[in-house]
Image (cartoon, rainbow, N blue to C red):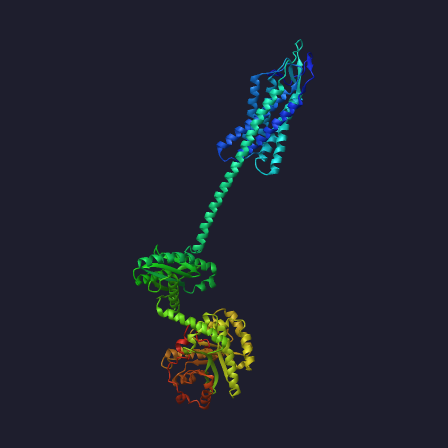
Amino acid sequence: MDWLGLQLFAALPTSGQILLDCQHEPFLVSLAYVVVCAASFATLDMAERQSHSENPSARRQWRVLGACCLSGGIWAMHFISMLAFRAPLEIHYDVALTGLSLLLALFAAWLAMNSLDRRDMRPRHYLQAATCIGLGITLMHYVGMAALQTSAQQYYQTSLLLASLGIAIAASLVALLMARYFRNGSGTLHLVMKYGASLLMAAGIVGTHFTGMAAMTLVIPQGASLSLPTSDNSLQLGLTIACITLLISASSISAALADKKLQSKEHDLRRVSVLLSQLDQARVSLQQAAHYDALTNLINRRGFNQVFAERLADHAANESMLAVMFLDIDHFKRINDSLGHAAGDDLLKVIADHIKAATRSQDLVARFGGDEFCIVTSLNNRDEARHLALRIMQRMKDPIDLGGRRMVMTTSIGISIYPDDGRNTEELLKNADLALYQSKGCGRNNLNFFNTGLRTRATLELQLEEELRVALLEERGLCVHYQPIFDLHTGQVAKLEALVRWQHPQHGLLGPDRFIGIAEANGLIADLDLWVLRRACEDLAQLNRHGYANLKVTVNCSALTLGREELPADVEMALLLAGLAPWQLELEVTENALMGDIHRVINLLKRIRGQGVALSIDDFGTGYSSLAYLKRLPLDVLKIDRSFIQDVPASQKDREIVQAIIMMAHTLHLQVVTEGVETVEQHEFLAAHGCDYLQGYLLSRPVPLADLRPVLERLDRQDSDFIACADTAVPGSPDLFADSPGYRAGASIARRGH
């Protein structure tokens, strides 16, 4: 087949002269390999820049530049290799065909760069691209060979011709794979591997050319004249083409390197910008976390202090009024204990919404932690603060669906007013907190304004707390009074109830209602109870030595003391130190003290009763009065509260209640003590209806140990009619330091043996 003067797939002629003495200039061959190596490396760089460019226009520019580098390298290698070809003939080059070969090389290189720009390359895409590029390189080679003008004809061996095509396709496939692989990565190893890839690509391109050259045979036709070469400028021309191509490749590599550095700086700047943005977001988040509550999205205590100080300064400048309200959710702990903390968090969110809905947009609403909220609002008069507090309390009573239950919550509110109740943040917050404490002490679901009496009371309580600690530590000032308990069956005093008193150096003799609450609130109650227990046992042991060996002492036990696992051991040690028998001690507990962890309390009481110590339930009827629990408790005695006996026998309902309690207690095999007995009529009624023991002013007030023996002797000398004439106390008269009705009915103390 004759194509552009080339004899392809044709057999050699039978006549003619075959030129065998053809060779290549080694220097120019090496130069051609160096040129194509540089072009290959530049092409790999262009492919890398093309893949990393985010701008479509820049990607096109790198694609064009890469195509120029690759095509220039391939064409320059071919042309320099042709200049290295030495044959005993005069050789010329056709300009048009030479230019066409360059265009074919550019087309093949463009196909290669365009293939590398695909995001998703599958195996068939690689094969298609490699075939097209290999055909392009092969066409470029043979068009270039057609540009070789001599007096001889070019015949090509078919097997080697096809081999050159296969090498071109294989080289193209390898080049595509390497270019795709080396477009990502960095470091010295990556660069070394890219150098090796460039050498391999160049070897494939050179291999295509020289396989094609090996397939060529020059045949001088029969009768043709042989023209010998006259001059040879191949070296100068090869060097010129090589220099131009190397300069283009070097410039392209330099441009790629500069762009890489620039893009790296851009990436660094972008990273810095992203980091700055993240830092800014983190600063905002930290500020949000530092000044806002994550659960309710209300401002927290820290943010509140900052905003409140600013508002206070504005009101000071304008001489206007401002209210500070402390809110506390009533019995919120029950929600956490019964439904869990997740339900408690949900409830706090709803409550926060209720508070925000009841306040104005300019009001400052904050959550201080737990179930404690604070509101700051501007006022024209004090009534506005009251109306706002009432509006909040009313809104809080809206039913809330929580954990499958429909609940209604209440709140206690304390209010302080600027400037009447303080002129700085600390003073206003402290006074609002005191007013809140007053609201909770008044039965909750209430509001109170601060007054100076609250501050005086708080100061006194703080002073009493400090002095009570010293009194307990030094055992100075505390004492125990005893009130006899009369046995109606034997007509004798059977028991003594131990009641704590405090001989204060400034305030005189203080009853338990003045300091028991302080002891409970500050963790002193357990030490106080233990001190009373030991002192009562010691005093009873002293009475035993004076002939009162059949007496028992009853000691009250607070709810907090009842929660201590060490209580049985403390009781045993107190009896051991005093030398008392366990039957001579009776512990009194209130109903409310039993209603905590009932299972643990029952086990604790069983341990104490197992030692031989008797147990009694005090103030029965004023607490939960759960018969289901009462029948399970290991009790010996039930004490009827004085509130049920004070109107007996005049009140029929009270008579019936007392009778029912006595019958129920006897049914449960419990002895009955009625406290607060002050009249003969009460005594006669209780004796007639089976009550076992009496306690009250009719017999005696609580007295110190030094005055107790005459009282016991007086009571034991008289028969059952002594009550009508023996008591020197005025029935129903108040006693500042005895167990007054207000003290026995108090929710926080519930008498608890003090």
Query: Which quarter of the image is occupied by the N terminus?
Result: top right
Residue at 39%, 89% in the rendered image: 725
Q: Is residue 517 above or below residue 318?
A: below
Q: Nearer the viewer, residue 146 or 502?
A: 502
The percent coordinates of residue 402 (x first, y second) are 43, 59
Q: Nearer the viewer, residue 86 or 511?
A: 86
Q: Position of residue 639 (x, y in %)?
A: 45, 78
Of residues 68 and 552, the one nearer the viewer is 68
Q: Residue furthest top?
A: 223
Determine whether, in the image, residue 318 is placed left or right of residue 715.
Answer: left
Residue 184 visible to an observer of this rendering: yes
Q: Residue furthest front?
A: 236
106 lies above or below 706: above
The residue depicted at 47 percent of the width and 49 percent of the height is 282
Give residue 516's quadrant in the image: bottom left
Which of the pair 638/320 is nearer the observer?
Answer: 320
Total number of numbered labels? Answer: 0
Residue 394 vs 75, above or below: the answer is below
Whether residue 158 is visible, yes or no, is no
Q: Decide: is 263 above or below 407.
A: above
- Where in the figure is residue 110, as x and y percent of width and height? 54, 27
In this picture, residue 72 sits left or right of residue 291: right
Quarter assignment of residue 610:
bottom right
Q: Quadrant of the C terminus?
A: bottom left
Residue 209 sits in quarter: top right
Query: Where residue 235 appears, x then y in whole percent?
Result: 63, 20
Which residue extends farthest left?
380
